[in-house]
Image: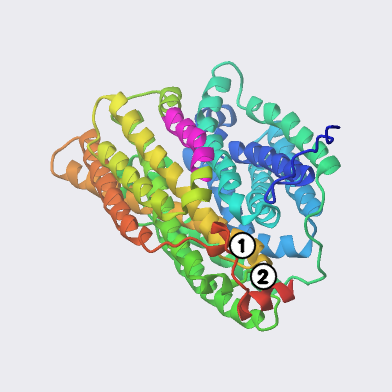
Amino acid sequence: MPHSPATAPAPRADALAPRDRSVIILLLISAFVVILNETILSVALPPIMDDLGLAETTAQWLTTGFMLTMAVVIPTTGYLMGRFSTRQVFAIAMTTFTLGTLICALSPSFLPLLIGRIVQASGTAVMMPLLMTTVMNLVPPSRRGQVMGNISIVISVAPALGPTISGLILSVAPWRALFVLVLPIAIAALLFGLRRIENVNEASDQPADPLSVVLAGLGFGPLVYGLTGISGGGGHGGDAADAASGGAPTAAVICLVVGVLSLGLFVGRQLSLQRQERPLLDLRTFSSRSFTIAVVLMVVMMGAMFGVVVLLPIFLQKVLELSTLSVGLMMLPGGLAMGLLAPLVGRLFDRVGPRPLLVPGLAAVVVGIGIMSRVPDQPWLIVVGHVIMSLGLAFVFTPLMTTAMGSLPRARYGHGSAIVGTVQQVAGAAGAALLVSIMSRIAAGTVESGGSTLEGISAGTSVAFTLSAALGLVTVVIALFVRRNPEEAGHEPAPGPEVQGADAAE
């Protein structure tokens, strides 16, 4: 009896095509490079100040300018991804980032270096929304958690590695080496991406609304600047007690007012343009309950996390008198733990949905921050608390991003990713400003009562971390209301009128 010929197993219905997998891998690598650059300068400011003869307030614009540019550009990425094709948006992002890196590497003085950082930030701001939107377009709902877990690796490991890599490089080379080493990697990613990346969307001929662009710049830029400066500079590494004694800088308050008023006008303008189906940032994303709850949770968690990230090095360097390299190495285990756990969390999300992951994850964040709020004088306890917090965050970010984006119709993926990116910037700045302000004022009160500055910083850090942990408890309650999107469980619902209209507009 003749044997029937062997047949190849049928591909899984939710398997990624080789082309789609290549696109996502290339975008992940490119995003890792640009996000690594975002934190690689954190411990390089003192050498730059010494080499270029800069005051601390001037040098801080190398990080502040980067953050402000991100806040201004990210809200426009939803429009960019609708107006241009995938290949074009990638070319814009990586070419801009590579050009900025080259300018920084060749900068003979402060002004060219600042311009290079601003150009770098413009490319960085586009890359993450491009990656998230492409994943949502290419990956079946049943596998989005797994792929979003890989994105979480980029988001968590790259910033964690930045200070450590920077400290190691600066121990053997001048600060320009930070950009010289990144430049060939960026060029390679650009050339390889232009050769291999294929379009997953078609460009439209929708024109940009100039007034919306101006209002976005006048809203998000001054808002983030005002938030970072409202604590009087303590968040920039100055003396926290001195910062608190002067109160909130007038310029920061003015920027906050300008930012809030401009954002009000920006929202009104978008609501008007939505009726014509041409908003710069589509706010109808908030009509999704799951998206709104996920964004609220993201605001609180990003605020708490960035507050800890800013305050912890101040405490470790000023009170425990540790070097910048030691601080970078202490932060490394938490970032690596978060990144290594992210793929597992993504696979678990595909099986069980967001709530079983969010509740224990948020609880772990509270425990980790609670340990650090005791500001122990043993560095290993700080590392333990930071690792527990990071492991908790690993169970939070992938479910939040996947739930938020998966609740939107395809036509609004770009706008949803732009909103998520903008929220991260604004919430991070707000959280850092709030916690640094609390720490600074308690530190100043301790000094006025006869205590030392170091005692004041220690007491202020403890109170600020305690407040951060309390906010974390609130998120545990909110997480109970997060629901799984039906299509991610393999039961895709029939599109309602809103989804049908959005898809038709696409």
Q: Which secondary structure dominates the residues rendered in magenta?
A: helix
- The magenta-colored residue range is 331-346
Residue at 59% across, 31% down: 52
Image position, residue 397 (x, y; %):
48, 49
Mark 2 packing: few (<14 Cα in 10 Å), some, or many (20+)? Answer: many
Q: Which amino acid does label 2 sit on?
A: Leu
Contact between labelled residues 1 and 2, with CB atoms less than 8 Å apart: yes
Residue at far front of view: 1
Q: How far apart are marks 2 and 1 (CA)?
A: 8 Å
Image position, residue 95 (x, y; %):
77, 44
Q: Hey, which quadrant is residue 168 in on the image?
A: top right
Q: Was residue 95 drawn as part of the magenta stretch in this picture?
A: no
Question: In this rendering, would 440 be left or right of 286?
Answer: left
Residue at 64% across, 57% down: 73
Image position, residue 466 (x, y; %):
25, 47
Q: Looking at the rendering, in which quadrant would you find the C terminus?
A: bottom right
Q: Can residue 320 be seen in this view?
A: no
Image position, residue 430 (x, y; %):
42, 56
Q: How many marks?
A: 2
Nearest to N terminus: mark 2 or mark 1: 1
User: Label 2 belongs to which residue?
Assistant: 280
Q: Looking at the rendering, in which quadrant would you find the N terminus?
A: top right
Residue 75 is marked as 1
Query: 285 or 461: nearer the eye?
Result: 285
Question: In this rendering, would 322 be left or right of 203?
Answer: left
Instruction: Please say if 348 is above or below 138.
Output: above
Q: Hey, which quadrant is residue 202 in on the image?
A: bottom right
Q: Which amino acid does label 1 sit on?
A: Pro
